[in-house]
Image: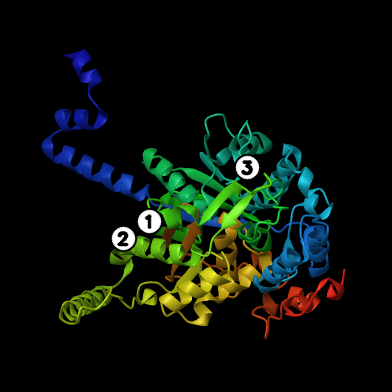
Amino acid sequence: MHANTMELTPLLAVVLLLPPALAVAHMAWTAASRRRHTRCYLLDYVCYKPEDDRTLTAELAGEIVQRNERLGMAEFRFLLRLISRAGLGDRTYVPRNLLDGREELAAGQLHAVDEMDACFDGAVPELLARTGLRARDVDVLVVNVSGFFPEPCLASRVVRRYGMREDVAAYNLSGMGCSATLVAVDVARNAMRARSPRPVMALVVSTESLAPHWYAGKDRTMMLGQCLFRCGGAAVLLSSDPAHRGRAKMELRRLVRSTTAASDDAYSCIMQREDDDGLRGVSISKALPKAALRAFAANLQRLLPRVLPAMEIARLAADLAWQNLLQRRRHRGQTKLKINLKAGVDHICLHAGGVAVIDAVKKSFGLEERDVEPSRMTLHRWGNTSASSVWYVLSYMEAKGRLRRGDKVLMVTFGSGFKCNSCVWEVTGDMADKGAWADCIDAYPPESKPSPFLEKFAWVNDEVADESSSPF
């Protein structure tokens, strides 16, 4: 009998050995405790600001393009035109090997490792210092870097670099593209749930490696990446401990992940491949904005019923029924619903993927310019920093003083595959840090945003321009 009792689970033992009333009370307490400890609180986050000597000015951009001997005048003008229309300013950052003229020698791992270490050191120690925690307090570590996956992995490198515990649960994500940061948050949250009711501290590090991936060829579908992607990263500290709610900035309410990879167009709209000359780069097709909208729509089908108020859901249902009736009577095409995203959230933290994606989301969902301003300004100041970009967007909102207790923030990420991941954060604490925007937030949004590249290379838009008109 004793041996059989020892094999029972703790909960079953309670049910059998305690009086019924006490057993029910214990189960209720256990369920409540487990639920409290499956909450996910955002204690703080830090956006990485690279060193000033890695700034890509318009003049340096011209020099980098000029030294690509594979470009003829047509490709040269096309690339400069892309750069001038990409929506980036002249204070973004690139890897040091690119500034030193060694972009085609970056196949070695050294440049990428240096780039990663600089990001880790520029975000993780500051985050720990701001929260008063030690690296050894971290129970779960999730690192996401899409295009660089050395062995040992980067998660192991972070563990070693900051002296984390031997029992830290370390996860390394690669190949997930610009949507990876919410995948990392989801992994961290699930790890917290698996360890409930024990309180768990999780560190998420999101960045990207550009040093080995600068495209130096002439395939036009692969040139856009070097016009958009820039260096950046973020470190985020999450906790499931209810005792931390009072010091947390935000609490995670919902998280939804969607992928439309079954569609050929969606799967191939962003793809790493080799060009005809064997040079590797990322190909971005014109189908990208439509793929982003389709993935966003698929994501919203699951998210909106959880965040929209009942009246808005009823309005959408009535509108859908009416349009279906008209469609049957008049043989109209596909039904289109006008969704008011702001009915369920106060702010939209949209991935700063590029002007085309931002404009497409704004137009399709009837958003105001103020709604996409944080994304547009992030693109201008930092460029597309891949998975970490939404943290710069959130930091812009915080630096502008727009986030108040009780506000709900919809965070949306897009990435290759094609993936759309979203989550809803609720502001629970004071959010007044200027973070990485501290030295420039007062200048945003600028009264006008003349492209420094367009001013520098205005001749590229001259239809009769030829080689003699080049300033180089």
From the viewer's perspective, is residue 330 above or below residue 18? below
What is the number of the mark on residue 227?
none
Q: Residue at x 70, y 57 (%)?
A: 218
- Tell me whether the residue at label 1 lies in contact with that at label 2, contact meaning CB atoms closer than 8 angstroms: yes
In the rendered structure, which amino acid carries the disc numbered 1?
Val
From the viewer's perspective, is residue 376 above or below residue 169? below
In the rendered structure, which amino acid carries the disc numbered 2?
Arg
Residue at the disc numbered 2? 302
Q: Residue at x 25, y 76 (%)?
A: 316
What is the number of the mark on residue 148?
3
Question: SS for tag 3?
Answer: loop
What is the number of the mark on residue 256?
1
User: Marks 3/2: CA distance?
Assistant: 32 Å
Question: SS for tag 2?
Answer: helix
Q: Residues within 10 Å of mark 3 (few under 14, many from 20)?
A: many
From the viewer's perspective, is residue 338 above or below residue 116? below
Quadrant that contains the N terminus: top left
Q: Position of residue 161 (x, y in %)?
A: 68, 37
